[in-house]
Structures are given as C-alpha cells and as structure tokens.
Image: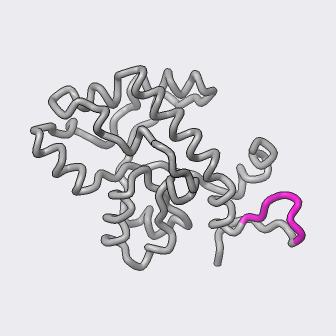
Amino acid sequence: MREWDERLVDKVKVSSAGFISQKLRDRLAKVHVSFPDPFYNRFMAETTQGALLKKGITVPDEWKSKELSPEMVEDADLLITALPEQQEELVNLYPRDRFKIFTTREMSRWEEYLIFEDFGVCPMDNTFWNYVEENPDYVSKVISAMEETLIRAFPNILKQLGIRERGKRKSQSFGSPA
C-alpha cells in the first residue's frame, strides 16, 4: 500500500465525520445512556490518540470531531460507514447518493468477527461512553480491527473511485468517477 501513498496524496482527499444512527440512539436510550454534550466538536480522547500513535498515526492536538452534514454527503465520491445501521439510515436519508454509500465490511469483503460492529462487548449503562473512549484495551482492539478492515478494503476503495492498480494494462487514472 505504501507505493500508493505518494501517488494518491494529492489526488484523493480523505475526511472523517460522525453519524449516529437512530437505531443506536434508540438502543442507548432504552438503557438510559445519554450522549455527551456536546457530542461533536470535541477533542479526541487521549486514550484514542495514544492508541493511534502506537500505530504511527499522529493526530493534531487541535483536531475535533465533526458531524456528517448533507453537504459532505453530496460532495463525497464515496462514503464508508463502520456499521450497517449507519449505511441503511444514510441510504434512506440520501437516496440519490445510495450508490456511493458502503460499509467497511462490504468494501473489505471480510466476513469474520469485527469488534466495532459488536456493542455487546460494551457495558450498556452510564459507563458506556467512558468505556468506548477511554478503555485502552477496547480502543486498541477497535483501532486494530478497523485498520485490518481498511487494509483489506483498500483495493476495492480504489476500484470504486476509478483508480487502477499498478501493473494493470489500461492507463492509470486518478480522481473521482465522472
């Protein structure tokens, strides 16, 4: 994958934004788990920053979370959700954009257990957010699972964006599909 880094850095813009599905909101409400206020526009938890740093990923101190907006959906060439419920709800909210909304599982074509899809491992009480944001073992496992999934998804992400792999007979193409 490293051979692509330099060639893609000016061609592909990657962005991250959060989207909480109504199914998750309802599930947490049933067990009286409220969302932190504010939920977006918060700094990344130190535990998460530390786990990413162990993977060689540095996050600027001023980085803050952001909520997925309709403009982001419209402007994106590809949206990849962590959870199937997110994809389902986004497709319902943005039916014209359904062709560009996928799950990490679809892109990776990985059928094995993915911890970030399993909230059954999290306490379903008022310690929920502390656990998912500050428990070093959980955070590390989620980051590792997401890393593995995205590495597996990388060739399909390139294909979806219309980027040909090195060594293919046709000429290289970069950018978004027209």
Residue at the spot 18% in from the left edge and 48% down from the top edge: 27
Residue 141, relative to residue 2: is it above or below? above
Front residue of this view, candidates 110 and 58: 110
Which residue, as the protein is rendered here, is positioned at the far front?
Answer: 112
Q: How is the image coloured?
A: one colour
Q: Quadrant of residue 69?
A: bottom left
Front residue of this view, candidates 86 and 119: 119
The residue stretch that appears in magenta:
163-169
Residue at the spot 37% in from the left edge and 49% down from the top edge: 18
161 to the left or right of 45: right
Q: Is residue 167 magenta?
A: yes
Magenta residues: mostly which secondary structure? loop
Front residue of this view, candidates 89 and 106: 106
Give residue 84's position: percent from left, percent from top. Answer: 38, 57
Q: Is residue 96 magenta?
A: no
- Quadrant showing the C terminus: bottom right
Residue at the spot 35% in from the left edge and 65% down from the top edge: 88
Q: Quadrant of residue 133?
A: top left
Give residue 139's position: percent from left, percent from top. Answer: 42, 28
44 to the left or right of 35: right
Give residue 1's position: percent from left, percent from top. Answer: 75, 45
Number of marks in picture = 0
Residue at the spot 69% in from the left edge and 69% down from the top edge: 162
Give residue 19's position: percent from left, percent from top. Answer: 34, 53
Residue 142, relative to residue 11: is it above or below? above
Front residue of this view, candidates 57 and 114: 114
